[in-house]
Image: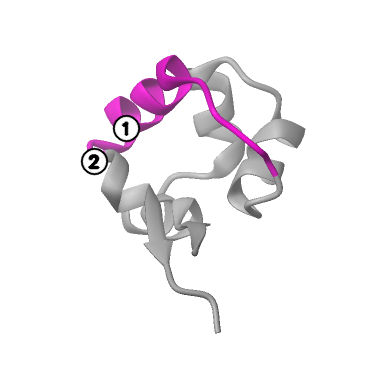
Amino acid sequence: MKIVVNLDVMLAKRKMKSKELAEKVDITPANMSLLKQGKVKGIRFETLSLICHFLDCQPGDILEFVDEP
Protein backbone atom coordinates (compact mmCIF):
# COMPACT_ATOMS: atom_id res chain seq x y z
CA MET A 1 0.00 0.00 0.00
CA LYS A 2 1.14 3.50 -0.80
CA ILE A 3 -0.08 7.02 -0.17
CA VAL A 4 -0.15 9.17 -3.29
CA VAL A 5 -0.13 12.97 -3.00
CA ASN A 6 -2.51 14.68 -5.45
CA LEU A 7 -1.61 18.20 -4.41
CA ASP A 8 -0.70 19.23 -7.96
CA VAL A 9 -4.19 18.23 -9.12
CA MET A 10 -5.88 20.37 -6.46
CA LEU A 11 -3.58 23.31 -7.21
CA ALA A 12 -4.53 23.09 -10.89
CA LYS A 13 -8.24 22.87 -10.06
CA ARG A 14 -7.97 25.97 -7.88
CA LYS A 15 -5.71 27.76 -10.39
CA MET A 16 -3.13 28.40 -7.70
CA LYS A 17 0.66 28.21 -7.93
CA SER A 18 2.52 26.08 -5.41
CA LYS A 19 4.65 29.10 -4.46
CA GLU A 20 1.50 31.06 -3.57
CA LEU A 21 0.18 28.19 -1.43
CA ALA A 22 3.58 27.79 0.26
CA GLU A 23 3.47 31.46 1.30
CA LYS A 24 -0.07 31.14 2.67
CA VAL A 25 0.76 27.95 4.59
CA ASP A 26 4.10 29.39 5.73
CA ILE A 27 6.38 26.66 4.40
CA THR A 28 9.25 27.02 1.97
CA PRO A 29 8.64 26.55 -1.76
CA ALA A 30 11.24 23.75 -1.61
CA ASN A 31 9.23 21.89 1.05
CA MET A 32 6.03 22.43 -0.96
CA SER A 33 7.77 20.93 -3.98
CA LEU A 34 8.87 17.89 -1.97
CA LEU A 35 5.33 17.49 -0.67
CA LYS A 36 3.88 17.69 -4.19
CA GLN A 37 6.31 15.02 -5.36
CA GLY A 38 5.41 12.72 -2.46
CA LYS A 39 9.01 12.76 -1.22
CA VAL A 40 8.15 13.52 2.40
CA LYS A 41 7.74 10.95 5.15
CA GLY A 42 5.10 12.92 7.03
CA ILE A 43 3.09 16.10 7.27
CA ARG A 44 1.85 17.95 10.33
CA PHE A 45 -1.92 18.00 10.77
CA GLU A 46 -1.69 21.78 11.17
CA THR A 47 0.01 22.09 7.76
CA LEU A 48 -2.48 19.72 6.13
CA SER A 49 -5.34 21.68 7.69
CA LEU A 50 -4.01 24.96 6.30
CA ILE A 51 -3.51 23.46 2.84
CA CYS A 52 -7.09 22.18 2.87
CA HIS A 53 -8.35 25.55 4.09
CA PHE A 54 -6.65 27.53 1.33
CA LEU A 55 -7.53 24.99 -1.38
CA ASP A 56 -11.09 24.59 -0.04
CA CYS A 57 -10.85 20.81 -0.02
CA GLN A 58 -10.73 17.75 2.23
CA PRO A 59 -7.57 15.80 3.14
CA GLY A 60 -8.85 12.92 0.99
CA ASP A 61 -8.76 15.23 -2.03
CA ILE A 62 -5.00 15.55 -1.55
CA LEU A 63 -3.95 12.18 -0.12
CA GLU A 64 -4.94 8.86 -1.71
CA PHE A 65 -4.24 5.34 -0.41
CA VAL A 66 -3.54 2.95 -3.32
CA ASP A 67 -2.40 -0.64 -3.80
CA GLU A 68 1.09 -1.06 -5.18
CA PRO A 69 1.56 -3.63 -7.96
- Residue type at mark 1? Cys
Front residue (pair 41, 32): 41
* Residue 1 in sight: yes
- Residue 11 is left or right of residue 49, and the answer is right
- Residue type at mark 2? Cys
Residue at image mark 2: 57
Eyeballing the image, is 1 above or below 20? below
Q: Are marks 1 and 2 in contact (CB under 8 Å)?
A: yes
Residue at image mark 1: 52
Dot 1 falls on a residue whose secondary structure is helix
Q: Quadrant of residue 30?
A: top right
Eyeballing the image, is 56 above or below 50? below
Could you say where residue 45 lies in the image, as x and y percent from the top left?
Answer: 42, 20
Front residue (pair 22, 35): 35
Count of picture labels? 2
Dot 2 falls on a residue whose secondary structure is loop
* Residue 14 in sight: no
- Range of residues picked out in magenta: 40-58
- Which residue does the image show at 55% across and 84% down from the upper left? 69
Eyeballing the image, is 30 above or below 67? above
Please tell me whether residue 44 belongs to the stretch shown in magenta. Answer: yes
Q: Which mark is residue 19?
A: none
- Which residue does the image show at 32% across and 37% down from the upper left? 55
Could you say where residue 32 lies in the image, as x and y percent from the top left?
Answer: 64, 36
- Residue 59 is left or right of residue 1, and the answer is left
Q: CA distance from mark 1 to mark 2?
A: 5 Å
Please tell me whether residue 49 belongs to the stretch shown in magenta. Answer: yes
